Image: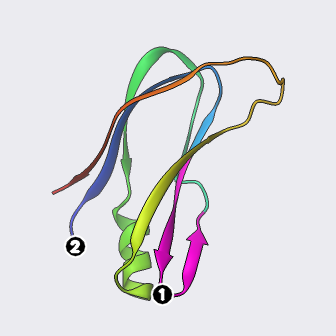
Amino acid sequence: GKDIYMELNYKSELPMVISFYDKSGNGVNKYESVVTTTPTTQWKKIYIYLSEEISHKISQQGPTTFSFYFNVINDADQTKEVMLDNIKLITR
């Protein structure tokens, strides 16, 4: 019943997909993206609301462990920068 957010700062020359997977008694389940960012040359701070996704998984499966992943696709196969900073999970 708590609000859950991920807070992070990012600067990326490529779109970035943020999502999560869980490890429960049923194995490992990977989920669709939670958010896709747009490329930016300036540092940006975002807050990603996760309460609905995580609460739904816990109500279906019971206690579980969640891990987050950050994915970028470089179709041009060129050197690009992706920077992440101050990644936090916040509950209240």
Residue underneath mark 2: 1
Number of residues whose C-alpha sits closer than 10 Å to that of mark 1, classed few (under 14), some (14–19) or many (20 or more): few
Instruction: Point out residue 35 in the picture as x, y percentages from the top left corner.
Output: 53, 47
Q: Please, which residue is most extreme toward the left here?
A: 92
Image quadrant in which you'd find residue 51: bottom left
Q: Which quadrant of the figure contains the C terminus?
A: bottom left
Q: Which quadrant of the figure contains the N terminus?
A: bottom left
Image quadrant in which you'd find residue 60: bottom left
For the point 60% across and 19% down, which residue is it? 81
Instruction: Point out residue 26 in the picture as x, y percentages from the top left corner.
Output: 54, 87
Q: Which residues are magenta?
A: 18-31
Instruction: Point out residue 43 in the picture as x, y percentages from the top left corner.
Output: 42, 18
Report, in whole angstroms, how far the alpha carbon at label 2 lies from the one at label 1. 22 Å
Task: Indicate which disc, 2 or 1, sits on the residue closer to the N terminus.
Answer: 2
Query: Is 15 part of what is drawn in magenta?
Result: no
Image quadrant in which you'd find residue 75: top right
Query: From what the image shows, is residue 2 above or below residue 64?
Result: above
Query: Is 30 part of what is drawn in magenta?
Result: yes
Instruction: Please state the total of marks drawn on the protein image.
Output: 2
Query: From what the image shows, is residue 42 above or below residue 47?
Result: above
For the point 48% across and 87% down, which residue is it? 25
Name the amino acid, label 1.
Answer: Gly
Instruction: Point out residue 90 in the picture as x, y percentages from the top left corner.
Output: 23, 50
Q: Nearer the viewer, residue 51 or 80?
A: 80
Q: Which mark is residue 25?
A: 1
Query: Dominant secondary structure of the magenta stretch?
Result: strand
Name the amino acid, label 2.
Answer: Gly
For the point 48% across and 74% down, which residue is it? 23
For the point 79% across and 18% down, which residue is it? 78
